[in-house]
Amino acid sequence: MLNDTALATLFYNARTHNVWLDKPVSDQQLHQLYDLMKWGPTSANCSPARIVFAKSPEAKEKLGACMDPGNADKTRAAPVTAIIGMDIAFYEKLPQLFPHADARSWFAGKPAKIDETAFRNSSLQGAYLIMAARAIGLDCGPMSGFNAEMVNATFFAGTSVKANFVCSLGYGDQGKLFPRSPRLSFDEACKIV
């Protein structure tokens, strides 16, 4: 069981940031983040997420050009923005990732099942990325306001990867947060049957 400090770091006090302090995120931190998030479960261990960390000024400028107007400047200003992609050919890695069954055959030639599985599981992995980032002391700013075709052409051209969502990473400016938005209660969102 995690203590209250850990729960506050991961959930209660964690916020979505839009304004970033001028403090870099190291390549070592990005490796550590991935080494944590990769252990999160996916169906048949399919692990379809493929991540591009836009960190250089050139990469941030290219990504900023792909973002909706409200997200462009904050993406350029973030120390790093992770582009969480989904590999539509993820099933080709299943002999390596799920060797105790012929899991590749569950997907090969089934585009609807491939797309559904890649989207669902890369979304899960993106959520694990957020939790891993918070666990190592980084703040996050996940976004879905971008031109996916432009992101795909700019960062995933010639591959089987398509963009799912993006998430800025760094050290958020706590003084620039707006009041926390409410959440639904258990009774509004859940049912025990």
Image (cartoon, rainbow, N blue to C red):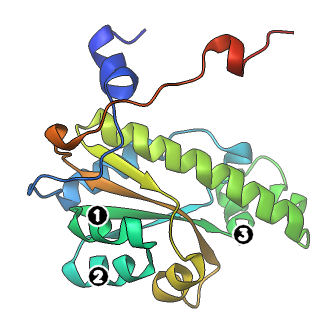
The residues bearing labels 1 and 3 have C-alpha atoms spaced at a distance of: 36 Å
Kind of element beneath mark 2 = helix
Q: Secondary structure at mark 1?
A: helix
**Left or right of 19, for residue 87:** right
User: Cα distance, mark 1 to mark 2?
Assistant: 11 Å
Q: Nearer the viewer, residue 159 or 98?
A: 159
Q: Are marks 1 and 2 in contact (CB under 8 Å)?
A: no
* Number of the front mark, 1 or 2: 1
Q: Amino acid at mark 3?
A: Glu
Residue at 51 percent across and 50 percent down: it is 126
- Which mark is on residue 74? 1
Percent coordinates x, y for residue 1 in the rendering = 43, 8
Residue type, numbered disc 2: Glu
Label annotation for residue 5:
none
- Indicate left or right for 111 with 68 as reference: right
Hey, which quadrant is residue 63 in on the image? bottom left
For disc 2, the marked residue is 61
Residue beneath the point at 24% across and 62% down: 78
- Return the residue nearer the eye: 24 or 17: 17
Question: In the structure shown, which secondary structural element does the residue marked by tag 3 occupy?
Answer: helix
Q: Are marks 1 and 3 in contact (CB under 8 Å)?
A: no
Q: Amino acid at mark 1?
A: Lys
Residue 141 lies left or right of residue 55; in this view the side is right
Give coordinates of residue 105: x percent, y percent: 89, 62
Marker disc for residue 92: 3
The spot of residue 159 in percent (x, y) is: 59, 84
Image quadrant in which the C terminus is located: top right
Local crowd at mark 3 within 10 Å, few (<14), some, or many (≥20)?
some
Residue at 80 percent across and 64 percent down: it is 114
